[in-house]
C-alpha cells in the first residue's frame, strides 16, 4: 500500500522544467489566434515577442523552441567562424549544450573559472588575447544569471555591469543566458530589464519556473533579431502555427513571474530541513533562488546512490556530481510537499 501511495504522490524536485501548464495556459493555447510564423503571420507569436522584448528592455524578440537553441542562435549571430567565445567554466552554454558552439558556429569556447558562476573583470581581462595571427578574435562574452551549476546563484548586478562594460570597451559583444532571469529579478528586487541592460542580447526560458510546456525568447536590437531569425531557420527552428505555444508564454509573463517568490521560500524551507538530515551537508545561506545543492557526506554513499534511495521513496532528485545533488522547487511543489519530502529523504538516507 505504501508503494502505491508513493507512486501517486511523487514529489518531483529534479528541475523547474517538469511543471504542468496551468488551466489558463491550456485554455489560451486552445483558443489562440494563429498563422504561419515563418511567413511572419502569427499574431500570437508577435504579441509574445513584443512583450518579451519590453520585459528585457530590448527592441525586439524571437520565439524559439528551447533555451539551448536560443543561446546557440545568439552565438551564431554574434560570431564568425574561427572566433572565440569567453564562457564561465561551468556555464550552461558550455557545460550542457554539447559542443554546440563549436559544432554550429565554428567558434571556439574558452572556459574561464569563476566563483559561484560569477566572472570577475580581472579574470576576463586575463583571458583576452592580443592581436596576433596565431590567435582567434575574441568576439563574444557569455554570462549566465542565475547560474545553474552554482545552485541558482545570482550574478551581482554591479559585477554584471562591470563585466559588460569591460567587454564593450574591448569591442566584445555580450550575450546573457538569462534562462532564469526572473528568478534573479525576484531574488534581488531588480527589474529584469535592468539586469539585462548591459547585454547586447539576452534569452530567457518560459519553460523554466514559468510553467510553460515549451519555449524561450531571445531579445536584442531589431537588426540583431532579424539576423537571428535567419539562423533560427538554419537550425530548423522556424515553426508554423506556433502561436498555440506562444499563448502559454503570454499567460506565463502575465501570471507566473510574481509567484516565483513562493518557489524561493520553499527552497529556503527545504534547505533548512536538509541541513538537519544525517548524511547531507548544506549551507542554507547559499540558497538565493529556487535551487538547493547538497553534498552527500554519508560514508560509502555517492550522490547517485543517495538519489536512487530518495527516488525510491517517491522524491525525484538529480545527482549533479560524484557527491552533490540538486533539488529545485517550482509551482507544482507546495510547502506541505516540502515537509513531506524532507521526511521521506531523512528516512531514505537513514536506511
Image: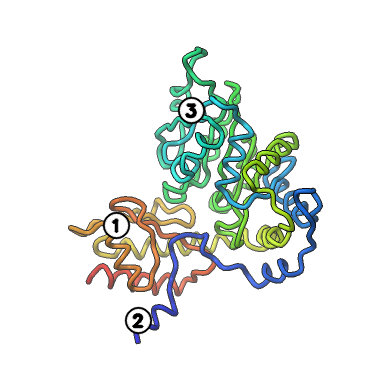
Horizontal placement of 278 versus 121: left or right? left
For the point 45% across and 24% down, the residue is: 127
Picture quarter containing residue 22?
bottom right
Q: Secondary structure at mark 3?
A: helix
Quadrant showing the C terminus? bottom left
Label 1: few (<14), some or many (≥20) within 10 Å?
Answer: many
- Mark positioned earlier in the residue sequence (2 or 3): 2
Using the image, tell me which numbered label, if any, was put on residue 196.
none
Q: Secondary structure at mark 2?
A: helix
Select label 2 or label 3 by which is in front.
2
- Residue lying at the far top in this picture: please name it: 132
Q: CA distance from mark 2 to mark 1?
A: 23 Å
- Mark positioned earlier in the residue sequence (2 or 1): 2
In percent of width and height, residue 231 lies at: 66, 39
For the point 56% across and 29% down, the residue is: 140
Residue at the spot of label 2: 3
Label 2: few (<14), some or many (≥20) within 10 Å?
Answer: few
In percent of width and height, residue 288 lies at: 46, 52
**CB atoms of marks 2 and 3 within 8 Å:** no
Residue 166 visible? The answer is no
Picture quarter containing residue 117?
top left
Q: Nearer the viewer, residue 166 or 312?
A: 312
Using the image, tell me which numbered label, if any, was put on residue 121.
3
Instruction: Check the image and report above or below for 223 versus 279.
Output: above
Horizontal placement of 86 versus 284: left or right? right
Residue at the spot of label 1: 303
In percent of width and height, residue 116 lies at: 41, 42
- Residue lying at the far left in this picture: please name it: 299
Residue 292 visible? The answer is yes
In percent of width and height, residue 176 lies at: 57, 39
**CB atoms of marks 1 and 3 within 8 Å:** no
Amino acid at each position: 500500500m505504501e508503494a502505491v501511495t508513493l507512486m501517486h504522490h511523487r514529489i518531483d524536485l529534479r528541475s523547474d522544467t517538469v511543471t504542468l501548464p496551468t488551466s489558463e495556459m491550456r485554455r489560451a493555447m486552445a483558443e489562440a489566434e494563429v498563422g504561419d510564423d515563418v511567413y511572419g503571420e502569427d499574431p500570437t507569436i508577435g504579441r509574445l515577442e513584443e512583450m518579451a522584448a519590453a520585459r528585457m528592455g530590448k527592441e525586439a524578440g524571437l520565439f524559439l523552441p528551447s533555451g539551448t537553441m536560443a543561446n546557440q542562435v545568439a552565438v551564431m549571430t554574434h560570431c564568425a567562424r574561427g572566433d572565440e567565445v569567453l564562457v564561465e567554466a561551468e556555464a550552461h552554454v558550455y557545460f550542457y549544450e554539447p559542443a554546440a558552439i563549436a559544432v554550429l558556429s565554428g567558434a571556439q569556447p574558452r572556459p574561464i573559472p569563476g566563483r559561484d558562476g560569477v566572472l570577475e573583470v580581472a579574470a576576463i581581462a586575463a583571458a583576452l588575447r592580443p592581436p596576433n595571427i596565431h590567435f582567434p578574435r575574441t568576439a563574444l562574452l557569455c554570462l549566465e544569471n542565475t547560474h545553474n551549476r552554482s545552485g541558482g546563484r545570482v550574478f551581482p548586478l554591479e559585477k554584471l555591469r562591470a563585466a559588460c562594460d569591460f567587454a564593450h570597451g574591448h569591442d566584445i559583444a555580450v550575450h546573457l543566458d538569462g534562462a532564469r532571469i526572473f528568478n534573479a529579478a525576484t531574488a534581488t528586487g531588480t527589474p529584469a530589464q535592468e539586469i539585462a541592460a548591459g547585454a547586447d542580447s539576452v534569452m530567457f526560458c518560459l519553460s523554466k519556473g514559468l510553467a510553460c510546456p515549451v519555449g524561450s525568447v531571445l531579445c536584442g536590437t531589431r537588426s540583431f533579431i532579424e539576423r537571428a531569425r535567419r539562423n533560427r531557420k538554419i537550425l530548423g527552428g522556424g515553426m508554423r502555427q506556433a502561436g498555440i505555444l506562444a499563448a502559454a508564454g503570454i499567460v506565463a509573463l502575465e501570471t507566473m513571474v510574481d509567484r516565483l517568490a513562493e518557489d524561493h521560500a520553499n527552497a529556503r524551507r527545504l534547505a533548512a530541513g536538509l541541513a538537519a538530515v544525517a548524511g547531507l551537508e548544506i549551507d542554507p545561506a547559499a540558497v538565493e533562488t529556487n535551487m538547493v545543492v547538497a553534498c552527500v557526506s554519508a560514508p560509502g554513499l555517492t550522490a547517485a546512490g543517495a538519489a536512487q534511495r530518495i527516488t525510491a521513496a517517491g522524491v525525484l532528485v538529480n545527482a549533479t556530481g560524484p557527491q552533490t545533488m540538486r533539488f529545485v522547487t517550482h509551482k507544482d511543489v507546495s510547502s506541505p510537499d516540502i515537509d513531506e519530502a524532507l521526511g521521506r529523504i531523512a528516512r531514505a538516507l537513514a536506511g
